Amino acid sequence: MDMMVIEGGRTLQGSVRVSGSKNAALPLMAAALLAEGRTTLHNVPDLMDIRTMASLLRSLGAEVVRNDGDLEIEVRDETPIEASYDIMRTMRAGICVLGPLLARRHGARVSYPGGCAIGSRPIDLHIKGMVSLGAKVKTEHGYLECRVGRGGLTGREMYLGGAYGSTVLGTANVLMAAVLARGTTVIECAACEPEVVNLAEFLTAMGAQIEGAGTARLIVTGVKKLKATQWHTIPDRIEAATMLMAGAVAGGKVTVEGVRRDHLVAVLHKMNEMGIKVSHDGNGALTVTGRKRFRPVDVTTMPYPGYPTDVQAQLMTLLCLTDGISVVTEKVYPDRFMHVAELGRMGAEIRKENNTTIVHGVRGLSGAPVMASDLRASAALVLAGLVARGETEVRRIYHLDRGYENLDAKLIKLGAKITRKEQPAGEVLKD
């Protein structure tokens, strides 16, 4: 197992291009199970989660071939319906094959998914949606056992809101099931995230009839079949935000290319409140000018277009270096604060109260051995290492490799000093 060793205090300068969105690519890959013919997905990042999804699709009878940044997917055998525990345990997005399997093959046996340890993330809304469309679902031995009658799924109106708002993967899953259902499906409280819009537009290009993408109300008129096509994965807005914050915290001037600025409005607004200057050229490039200290802000994570939960941890690193007190409230995943203790090891002063943290700005952070608990916490610790005095060891960085394509190489290109080393045996800090 690798760890990342970061020498802090180096200014970042230059330009870097953002990769395709992992969170968009994974549902797109699952949707290829619905199509007849060969699907080509462009701008797909080479990540552990992408490779895991490719393995899952192969186990379900698809041929998956990577050509540089493209993935070609073609279903060769439509008889397999099981998504095994061995594959599903490492990746939550694997649950996205449930909808396509029920819509196309009228059956599915899907293991409960794994993924990052960021608190409870039930799949009850996925199940609710499938049951609403006519599937019979039961749980046995850790698997969802799902069946559909001979007539297939049937469209109907449903509400997909949960305790903390809409569900992104749940919306994607039900949407993929509904495109081949008989009649019309209306999804109320649908997720509005760009990744869901990208999926809806992809399905439409394959022949689906979908209205309302990007709004909380989706109307899907079922069709008999979908035809494979080519599609471009949107840029990764979370990686873009992370790189902008890296430039901000490390000083200097960093340009992030290939960005959809309209996907980052909430993040850019908070950065502006903190006194961070971000300019744009109108052609998909954002340039951040770093600074030594930031202004404190209060932030609450919300479903899109609110401030994204996936950029909460990274922002908290910056808030540690303000002249004042900031409040961070997590309303998407209330337990998503495992990075707080690790930032504390580096000298941060953060107090947690239920789903809220109070961050007291400090004069500086100091390098320390820290443990990555999940994907975005890993990124937050890397940002802290960039600005900390001395050397920081970020351990268990396999989380980073699941969701960021060559993050260390991109930061090194900008002037960071980062090396990968094998993590010491007999690790004291455990899962």
Image (cartoon, rainbow, N blue to C red):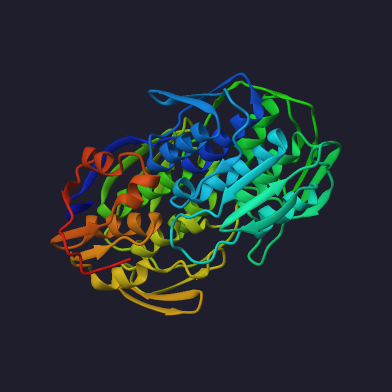
Q: Is residue 160 above or below residue 288?
A: below
Q: What is the x, y in percent for residue 249?
A: 29, 56
281 vs 373, left or right, is right
Give the total of numbered labels: 0
Residue 36 horizontal side relative to residue 294, left or right:
right
Residue 339 visible at all: yes
Q: Is residue 194 visible?
A: no
Residue at 45% from the left image edge and 67% from the top image edge: 297
Residue depicted at x 37% and y 44%? 404
Residue at 76 percent of width and 33 percent of height: 180
Assign the C terminus to one quadrant of the image: bottom left
Q: How far across and down, in percent of the image, does residue 105 sit?
A: 69, 34
**Frontmost residue, 20 versus 372:** 372
Taking the view exactly as shown, the residue that stands out farthest to the left is 390
Q: Position of residue 25 (x, y in %)?
A: 51, 36
Camera-nearest residue between 354 and 177: 177
Residue 70 location (% of width, % of height): 45, 24
Q: Is residue 7 above or below residue 54?
A: below
